[in-house]
Amino acid sequence: MLRRVLLSMSRSRRVRHIVETAPVSRSVVARFVAGTSAEEAVAATRTLLDKGLLASMDHLGEDTLDLQQATDVRDAYLRLLELLAAGGLTPGAEVSVKLSAVGQALPDVGEKVAVENARTICHAARNAGTTVTVDMEDHTTTDSTLGILRELRKDFPETGGVLQAYLRRTEADCRDLAYEGSRVRLCKGAYNEPESVAFTDRLDVDKSYVRCLKVLMAGEGYPMVATHDPRLVEAAQALAAQAGREKGSYEFQMLYGIRPDEQRRLAAEGHPVRVYVPYGQEWYGYLMRRLAERPANLTFFLRSLLSTK
């Protein structure tokens, strides 16, 4: 129930205004968000790479309904890629792009604009020596997002995709995407979805995650295991061994600020570990979804609120 409330709040303008204008210390947001500027995010990414980790950088923002705003987000990614290349941080750092942030939700022309902007970002990423992963959002955009991913992979086959285990359709989508050269990030999912399309019980979500991961590990692609759950980390390693995969033929992914000790432990064991690094002014929706995922995150946030003067 608490999770559903928090996820509903993530898209509430009124609650967003209250949270954004509350006297919350910068350290609260800084735990989960690597700054508001590209320069701050690049500095945080350099620190991660120096520790033997990888990074996938996300310029925060979604549900763009203004053409100029979509263009501005595209240009922000181009600037970010310039900074990464200039700093010698590629290919250790790639970028993650939400299609709704680059125009997908625009009336009538959304998919066309999103494809054009994403293609421009993919081209810049290739020139910078790195890659793009296309993020997945709520279930109403899944078919559109997968269609755009297929279109981008015609010219940029290195482009990664994301699937969400809590959706009932995802096991079938995994089969479709488990081909040679395909990069697929499998996560649990962090949107407030109806039971008709998504598993709502935590155990059912975990079972779906394992089924989906089994498909990806047995396939010809490159699985990207996005989880902080110790049981699923162990399951991933077992499924990889069962499929005859060596370390380096798949990777783990975790969020910035969550289980950093585990990130370093897995990297020390020889696993590629990529940290999802969000940055930018539009941090509210992202933060609320992180609070919904783990009660410990909410406790940390509320304690910080109470201690802020």
Image (tube, rainbow, N blue to C red):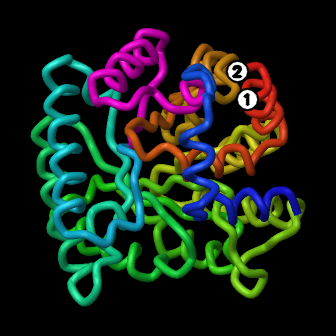
Q: Give the structural element (helix, strand or loop) at label 2.
A: loop
- Percent coordinates x, y for residue 90 in the rendering: 25, 27
From which residue to which does the magenta span run? 29-58
Q: Is residue 277 left or right of residue 244?
A: left
Check the image and name the residue furthest to the front.
309
Q: Is residue 20 left or right of residue 119?
A: right
- Percent coordinates x, y for residue 274 in the rendering: 49, 32
Tag 1: Cα neighbours inside 10 Å, few (<14), some, or many (≥20)?
A: some
Q: Give the structural element (helix, strand or loop) at label 1.
A: helix
Q: Amino acid at mark 2?
A: Thr
Q: Residue at x 41, y 38 (%)?
A: 56
CB-based contact (under 8 Å), mark 1 and mark 2: yes
Which quarter of the figure is the C terminus placed in?
A: top right
Tag 2: Cα neighbours inside 10 Å, few (<14), some, or many (≥20)?
A: few
Question: What is the number of the mark on residue 305?
Answer: 1
Please say whether residue 118 is visible from this viewpoint: no
Q: Residue at x 35, y 53 (%)?
A: 97
- Tell me the residue that label 2 is attached to: 308
